[in-house]
Image (cartoon, helix red, strand yellow):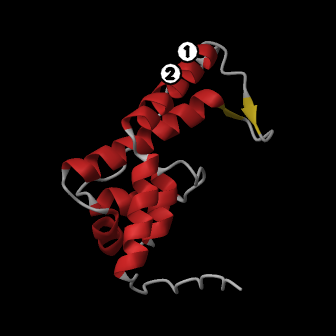
């Protein structure tokens, strides 16, 4: 009978075998084809909903345009991290944020991070957040 893998406690080190498995999984999700497909989907959504902004998510008033804009912002954090040659572990240590949480944020699995999380991530990159408003589509 196979045993279930145990969850590692936060901050625990992975074995070399576990690290290799994690990297293999990540590599599959980072193929150029997967990135190109993500870009096509983003462009399609942006093009289709740019003018109307009518698609609502979970009835909370967030438009698809808002989500696309937010995703662009998160991708800019990731690009800056990569430009600086920092790993997720580096940023996690600098920001005091769990590496898994940062990974979920960068990969679009966390769509509602706190302002504090975003500010700490930006600060770990030597940046700060700047706020602004633009006219809503159709107003």
Q: Quadrant of residue 65?
A: top right
Residue beneath the point at 43% across and 87% down: 12
Residue 125 image point, x, y percent: 26, 57
Left or right for 25, reference 62 = left
Point out the residue furthest to the left here: 84
Out of 78 and 95, give the one closest to the viewer. Answer: 78
Q: Which mark is residue 43?
A: 2
> Residue 125, can we see it?
yes
Residue beneath the point at 78% across and 41% down: 58
Out of 17 and 50, give the one closest to the viewer. Answer: 17
Circle 1 sits in a helix, a strand or a loop, which is it? Answer: helix
Picture layout, residue 48 above or below residue 56: above
Residue 38 image point, x, y percent: 49, 33
Residue named by callout 1: 47
Point out the residue furthest to the front here: 1
Out of 37 and 76, give the one closest to the viewer. Answer: 37
Which quadrant does the C terminus fall into?
top right
Circle 2 sits in a helix, a strand or a loop, which is it? Answer: helix
Picture layout, residue 51 above or below residue 64: above
Residue beneath the point at 39% across and 77% down: 17
Residue 127 image point, x, y percent: 26, 53
Which quadrant does the N terminus fall into?
bottom right
Residue beneath the point at 72% across and 21% down: 54
Q: Quadrant of residue 56?
A: top right
**Dot 1 alpha-carbon crowd within 10 angstroms: few under 14, some 14 to 19, many 20 or more:** few
The reply to whether callout 1 and callout 2 are in contact (CB within 8 Å) is yes
Q: Which mark is residue 96?
A: none
| Distance CA(mark 1)–CA(mark 2) | 6 Å
Left or right for 89, reference 54 = left
Residue 119 image point, x, y percent: 40, 58
**Dot 2 alpha-carbon crowd within 10 angstroms: few under 14, some 14 to 19, many 20 or more:** few
């Amino acid at each position: 009978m196979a045993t279930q893998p145990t969850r590692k406690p936060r901050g625990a080190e992975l074995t070399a075998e576990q690290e290799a498995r994690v990297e293999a999984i990540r590599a599959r999700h980072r193929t150029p084809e997967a990135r190109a497909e993500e870009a096509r989907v983003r462009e399609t959504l942006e093009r289709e909903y740019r003018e109307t902004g009518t698609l609502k998510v979970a009835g909370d008033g967030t438009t698809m345009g808002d989500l696309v804009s937010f995703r662009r912002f998160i991708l800019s954090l990731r690009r800056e991290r990569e430009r600086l040659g920092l790993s997720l572990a580096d940023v996690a240590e600098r920001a005091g944020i769990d590496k898994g949480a940062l990974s979920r944020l960068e990969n679009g699995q966390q769509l509602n991070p706190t302002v504090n999380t975003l500010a700490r991530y930006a600060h770990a990159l030597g940046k700060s957040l700047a706020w602004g408003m633009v006219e809503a589509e159709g107003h």
